Amino acid sequence: MRRLILGTVVACIACSGGTSAPHLARIAPIQSELTRDEQIAHALSRLSYGARPGDIDLVRRVGLERWIALQLTPERIKDPAGDSAVASYESLATPTNELTAAFREVRMARRDTTRRGEPAIMQSRRDLQMAVNEVGSAKLARAVVSERQLYEQMVDFWENHFSVFVGKGQTRLFIPSYDRDVIRPLALGRFRDLLGAVAQSPAMLFYLDNAQSGADSTHRTLAELGRSSRRPFAGRRRPGLNENYARELMELHTLGVDGGYTQQDVIEVARALTGWSIDQAAGAFVFRPAIHDADEKMVLGSRLEAGRGIEDGEQVLDILARHPSTARFITRKLAVRFVSDSAPPELVSRCAAVFTKTDGDIRQVVQCVVTSPEFFSKRAYRAKVKTPFEVVASALRAAEATPDGSPRATQIVARLGQPIFGRQTPDGWPDRAEEWVNAGAMVNRVNFGLSLAQGRAPGVRLKQASLDKSVASLLSSPEFQRR
């Protein structure tokens, strides 16, 4: 079976991937002080979730440069194993409006105690829980079995960069569409498109409270400027301005904390994004002109004219996506993810220039990072500590094991300290060693490796009843904790 999979992957090198698939990138022969086998092992440990038996031979046959080029164009990779792994998760395709309808049913039943035990209500509860659980289970399954490994790495990168917390209220209703419709389609696209999709995603709008943000009493709405026939706040309070999303948009999503913005910029951006809200029935983005602050604004030195609507927010996203600080901030995070915790400054400058030149083409920026001399340097080799998600995914790949489709495998990730979509603060899980290197964490990782080697890891299917001693030793060794 393994030989068949390898043959399929090699055959895909010649696949056209359809007329819309981009051309394979031209990657110059890699120059490195690492040996060729070290280069291959390094690429597999950073650009995938770890090597499976036979993967090093596969990359030798394909050629490292061509393998990287193919990983940068996942549209060209046939992925029957990945497709099959997620096919059983029926809730992944559930429309958000069905989840919001189920949520309303459950909420109404809580108020009407006579309905709490109704079969329909019980089923709605199960559907809601399954929708959240299956997103996490499918994410781990794809990381383990998909041939589009760099793509899965980038999906994880962006879901961590644009982090939302599943435990905050209705956010969980929007997690499936956040993964399916927002992050995955744009993970290797243009940053401005991704930024806009996130800004209009109900998951982010609810998590960072922008759905409730409206013009305060000191500014006029579109209604008050005469672009609407009614005055919505006559006799009742305005919703008021909420700065949460505006602040994190600049600090965490684009410019970075030292990116050159002020508190006044936070206020102005929040004003520009008033009215960006959620249609609760549809579970989708809606712009509400009645609560949009339509007065003039000034954001990072750029004037936003009075009397406009959704155009204010779109212009803000344009400004932020194309700001030099954003190019540096995003590129530095990619360098930390793929190269080293210290993010070599020369690499960041060089690849930030690619970000600017290509108008935020994520694929080209990633190519700049992962084909660089810094990436293939001795200093970067085995220098990163794996996150809990990476530990679990890479261990399953090394053991040729697969998640069984239940939430139990993702609960292992949570017990190791990184629940999927479980970061409460919007900064995402840290990607530096100090967060994950401590005595308790390392003991838990070793225990997981031993339980997997003994066939006792919950939620995991092994191809054989027990693993040989060499693999068992690998899975529980300190060296396995690095990539």
Image (spheres, rainbow, N blue to C red):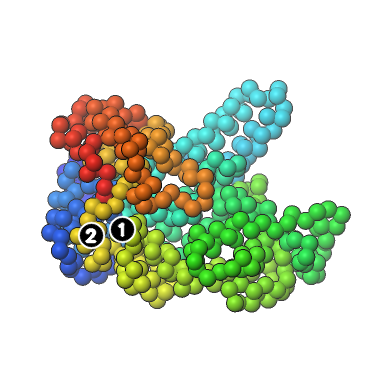
Find numbered disc 1 in the image and state the secondary structure of the residue it sits on: loop
Say which residue label 1 marks.
340
Asked if 478 appears above or below 455 in the picture, the reply is: below
Q: Is residue 117 left or right of residue 351?
A: right
Type of amino acid at the residue the image marks with label 1: Ser
At 78% across and 62% down in the image, what residue appears?
217
Asked if 14 appears above or below 474 in the picture, the reply is: below
Find numbered disc 2 in the image and state the secondary structure of the residue it sits on: loop
Residue 87 seen in this snapshot? no
Instruction: Identify the disc placed on residue 379.
Output: 2
Q: Is residue 165 left or right of residue 142?
A: right
Q: Is residue 400 left or right of residue 157?
A: left
Dot 2, how many residues are within 10 Å of its Cα: few (below 14), some (14-19), or many (20+)? few
Q: How many numbered marks does the figure carry? A: 2
State the image coordinates of residue 168 (x, y, percent, origin top left).
Answer: 58, 42
The residue nearer to you, when weighing 322 against 246, is 246
State the image coordinates of residue 479 (x, y, percent, origin top left).
Answer: 22, 44
Q: Is residue 2 left or right of residue 322?
A: left
Asked if 114 appears above or below 187 in the picture, the reply is: above
